[in-house]
Image: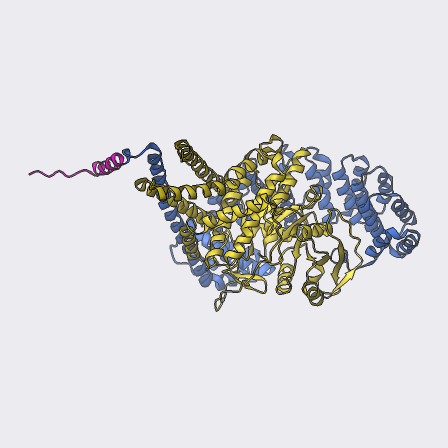
Amino acid sequence: MPEWIDYFFNYFVVVYSAAVLLSYVAMAVLAFLEHRKHYTYHDDAYTIDELKKSPYTPGISIVAPAYNEEKTVITNVKSLLSLDYPDFEVVIVNDGSKDKTLELLIENFDLVKVPYAYVEKIKTKPFRGLYKTRSDNPAFKRLTVVDKVNGGTKADASNAGVNVVTNKFFVCTDVDCVLDKYALYRIIWPTMSSTRRVIAVSASMRMSNGSVVEEGKMVETHPPHSLIPLFQDLEYTRSFLIGKTALARINALQNVSGGFGMFDREIVIKAGGYDGDSFAEDMDMVARMVRYMCDTGEDYRVVQIPETCCWTEGPPNFKVLNRQRTRWGRGLLQFFTVHHDMVWNRNYRRYGMLTLPYIMIFELTAPVIEFSGYLMVIYLFMRGGINYSTIWIAFLGLYIFAQLLTMVLISYDTWVGTAFKKKRDYLWFVLASLLEPVVYHPINVFFSLRGYWKHIWGTQMVWGNMTRKGVQQRKPLANPQPQQHPQAQNPDA
Amino acid sequence: MEYYTLSRYAYWKYYILIMYYRLAEYPPVVRAWFVFGAICLLLLVLVVLGNAFRTLSHYRFERTARHNSRRYWERMREIVLSERTLELAEVGSILELPKNYKMKERHCRSFIPTLLELKQSLGDRISRPNWLRLLQVLKMPAYFESQILSGSTRKRVQGFKDVADLDANLKEAVASRYLFTKDRKLQMHARLHAARFGTSYPFKVLEEDPNLLFTDEMVVKYHNVLVYRNENGLAMPNFIRWCNRVPLNEELRIFAVNEIRLFGRKEDCAELLSMLQASRDEAFSCAIIRCLGELEYVPAEKEFCRRYLSASFTERQVLAEAMGAIGSGNKEILKFLVDDFLQTTDYVTRMILLRVIYRYGEMGRKAFYQLKEKTSEEYQPYFAHIECDLIDSSRYA
């Protein structure tokens, strides 16, 4: 290997790594400032109480696409209907399911097809009909089921849901997600307390794999006790409580998760809705909303709230993880192909000047650089060129930094009072962070590269079915404690 | 042979020097990395210790709160449910607090969850004088005062919230210190506190603050405060004066109009109507129209019709809904609505007009079916949509 390549690689990697680590430190600091602000001024129980009593509390629509969900759809819809909020509707979009999803919904909720005057504000696959309940049950009256021809993507189904929602804000979620009873109060609050127009709100999500869920309701929260969902739980928590919180602090949040996020309906429609061809439709949606707001010169905010509002089932094995990460990798590359004009573009404010360049340099290119690093190590190992007296310092430093980040994450999580009631559950996070750099991370690098490869060569790709084990994996305690919303009565806790 | 014992400082210096010379063999990048790793390690230890300390203090707080709940629940219940107004000494003797027991900050704080639970579970059955005496014996007012006056921002904000939740009494002077503070959130909580418990005219600050940002959060909270004042017979603000006297803040004027609607103050309708005639602002006009509609103020119909043709689609929709809400059975109004349905081009306005016509009594229903017969096949789904009661069952039931 020519010597200049060796030099270039060495210095490039040093500079790149230093920049990555500094960006992590900066994010941790920004997230700290945001959590401190939240901790200082926000009181969950008080806020919920105020909103419950008020006639000014705005209505929210929940849009949940369902495709071949016959096993879980009834429990999950009942769970959505049992949420605590004064004014909400649940719109289930049956995306041309081939199983008995629609039949079961009709049977269980006493639904009947109604002559709904459907207006296609966002283009979707053909609309077949809309169902409403005949039952006198007031909870069932909140339910609307939209039946449409299968569009092949969640985006298309979500767009059909957006076309029928009646409230100013809608929450986009998956029908298999378990929502916190008070999730809607939490997610609406930033739109009311902000002096600027809030166009989207993102809430924290966790893995439900280790938790106890009964009748679609979260009874006890625990971290997953199998490795892959545990890694993903740690990754999600880090992403929401550090990465997204930090970016939201400077109003440069790049993504509102498709699992649970709230959007301003008017802006979504004006921005053209979800892109049915995108593999990263949630990130694409935020980009298009930001594009619309910046092009029209309007002020806006995209907010991240630290409270865990939603639990979703993580990939249980490498096969499903592979499919998910390959799709994410492909979606990321596709995103930059579509929105490349926003990168380094001052018109798009911090989103264009900070967020997108950051993602491009440190997320899009990272798998390529890391992979070349692995190849370099193998090459040097074979040539006997590894300096064993210094390499341990490099690894140890990185390892300590990773552990520090996890401990900071745990302290943020306990500070904002979110997920685990039993503090010993956090030991699972420590375990995951010990193994993550050597087990989980290299595999994800490979899956991301696979996604890039598929995008470049235009390989046909469809949304695969998620293999679900069900979330009631662990037995509940003899007397399970009902899940309480974090009562912020203890200022020092 | 002489032995020298190194001082503690020299001992550390010795080891640091050893490390320094060891590291001097390495290139600068490795040395920098080593320093970075050492700092991370130090921070890691500190964060772990911080987490452990916080977890322990949290457990300790929970244990104390549980203990208080177990020990004092029944006694507190007895006090607040007593039909007779108890003396302070009596309250103290029922509680059986240890003699010479000094209420420290953490003790007071640990009582709050129990008191909140008690208040929520008993609701209106609580005797207010006894409740205030109970709080006094537990030294809660003094605790809140110290929290608000000398605590961190978090404790101040939390103090105001706890006072509101517990319906405790606090000196007006405590909150007045923060009525114009730069911290917007703290200022809001202080003002809310003053508005909730103030005995004179606590809304003056709202009228006089030129930099007021009246967010939806404040709308929600001020409404709850006004409901509280109304229920407790405290002085209510003159909303119509707000509408007139606060030209600086449009949101506050809209809030005042909405409050007239929610409190059902029909006596203000005539003045609102005259304001509507002079109003140029769409949001303010829409609030007045909605208010007059919901309060079924029939004389407003004429003005509604006058405004309608020059109004935007948004205002037209509000006007149509207001005419429907008044539902005076006026044939002229129905004719106006039907004519506009035939002329308008906006889909949402058409649907609203159609719904209003359908619900406009017997004659409205008749006009609806006449329109249905007249209209082409293309628009029949709209009629079917309005006719189906199931579609908007949750909204228009």
Q: Is residue B327 visible?
A: no
Q: Residue furthest left?
A: B1
Quarter holding residue B380: bottom right
In the current view of this chain or complex, which residue is farthest to the bottom?
A: A478
How are the residues colored? by chain
Left or right of B133 on screen, residue A175? right
Q: Which residue is nearer to you in this view: B119 or A136?
A: A136
Q: Position of residue B115 (x, y in %)?
A: 51, 56
- Could you say which quadrant of the image residue B383 lies in? bottom right
Q: Is residue B382 visible?
A: yes
Residue at 67 percent of width and 33 percent of height: A297
Figure disc tally? 0
User: Per the image, is B7 magenta?
Assistant: yes
Q: Relative to the observer, which residue lies in front, A469 or B5?
A: A469
Residue B147 in the image: x percent, y percent?
47, 45
Q: Is residue A356 left or right of residue A89?
A: left
From the viewer's side, name the closer residue of A59 and B371: B371
Q: Position of residue A309 (x, y in %)?
A: 56, 53
Q: Is residue B11 magenta?
A: yes
Q: Colour of chain A?
A: yellow
Given residues A260 and A159, the one toward you in this image is A159
User: Which residue does the image show at 40% across and 51% down from the upper left?
Assistant: A434
Magenta span dominant secondary structure: helix
Q: Position of residue A389 (x, y in %)?
A: 30, 41
Q: Residue at x 30, y 35 (%)?
A: B26
In the picture, which quadrant includes the N terminus of chain B? top left
Which stretch did the figure color magenta? B1-22
Quarter of image, res B203: top right
Chain identifier, blue in the render: B
